[in-house]
Image (cartoon, helix red, strand yellow):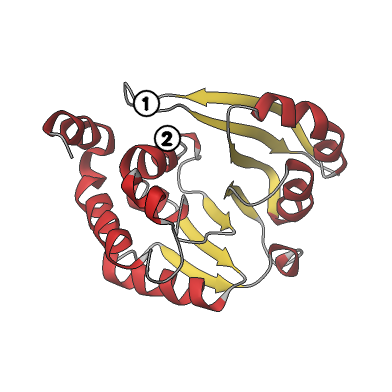
Amino acid sequence: MAAEDRAAYRDFFGEAYPGVASLAGLLEAEAGVRGLMGPRELERLWPRHLVNCGAVAALLPPGAAVIDVGSGAGLPGLVVALMRPDVTMELVDSMLRRTVWLAEAVAALGLGNTTVTRARAEELAGRRQAGAVLSRAVGPLDRLAQWCGPLLATGGLFLAMKGETAAEELAAAGAALKRHRLEQAEVLRLAPVAGVEATYVVRAVKTKP
C-alpha cells in the first residue's frame, strides 16, 4: 500500500483505523483459503471493500440496533461495528462456514457490540425490530425489501449498498419497497476518500402500517 493511500485511509477511519487494519489482516490471511473472497478482490481490499463499507457508517442513527443481512465475510457489518462502537451489530448469514468465520473475527477484534446469527433473514421476521438493516451484494432490491422490511422497527433505515446502476434498480423496484412499507427511497452517492470509487446506497425508511 502506498504511503499516501495509507494516510488517506487512516484519516477516513480515524480511531477505528487500527481495528480496520486488523480486520484487513484477518481477511488477507484467511478469506481466500476459506472461500470468502476471491484473489482479485483481496488485491483491492482497502479501496473496494473496506472504504466502501465504511462509507455507510455515518448514516446510522446513534445507538441503533443494526442487522447486517447476508454478512458473508463481515462486509459491511464488521467495518461498521468497528467505526460505530455506539451501535449494536448483528451479523446474519445462513452458511455455517461464514458464521464460524464471523464469530472468530468478532472474537479476534474484541467487538463487544457484535453478535453472529446463523439464519436466513426471512426466518427472523417477527423476531427483530432493528433501527437499521444493512445489505451488500446480497440480492436484487425487490428481494431485499421482502427480506429486510420485516426486520425493521417503524422509523428504521433500510440501507442497501449497490453499484452505479442503483438508480435504475430503484426505479424498477420502487413498488416492491412500498409494499413492504419502505418509503422515501433515494440513492445516496458517498465518496469519502478522494480517488476511491464512490459507494452507492439505496436508503429508505420503514413507515407505520
Mark 2 and mark 1 lie on one chain; the one further toward the N terminus is: 2
As drawn, 119 above or below 73: below
Q: What element does badge 1 sit on?
A: loop
Q: Residue 8 appears at what percent x and percent y?
A: 22, 29
Q: Name the residue at 36% across, 27% down.
A: 196
Which residue carries the number 2 mark? 55
Q: What element does badge 2 sit on?
A: loop
Is residue 40 in sight in this rendering?
A: yes
Q: Name the residue at 73% across, 42% down.
A: 141
Is residue 86 in sight in this rendering?
A: no
Q: Residue 61 appears at what percent x and percent y?
A: 50, 40
Q: Tag 1: residue type?
A: Pro
Which residue carries the number 1 mark? 192
Q: Do the residues labelled 2 and 1 touch (CB within 8 Å)?
A: yes
Residue 136 lies left or right of residue 13; in this view the side is: right
- In this rendered view, identify the residue nearer to me: 8 or 152: 8
Q: Residue 38 appears at what percent x and percent y?
A: 43, 57
As drawn, 183 above or below 37: above
Give residue 98's mark: none
In three-dimensional space, the C-alpha distance between marks 2 and 1, rounded to whole angstroms, equals 6 Å
Quadrant in which the C terminus appears: top right
- In this rendered view, identify the residue nearer to me: 139 or 160: 139
Mark 2 crowd level (few <14, some 14–19, many ≥20, 10 Å Cα):
many
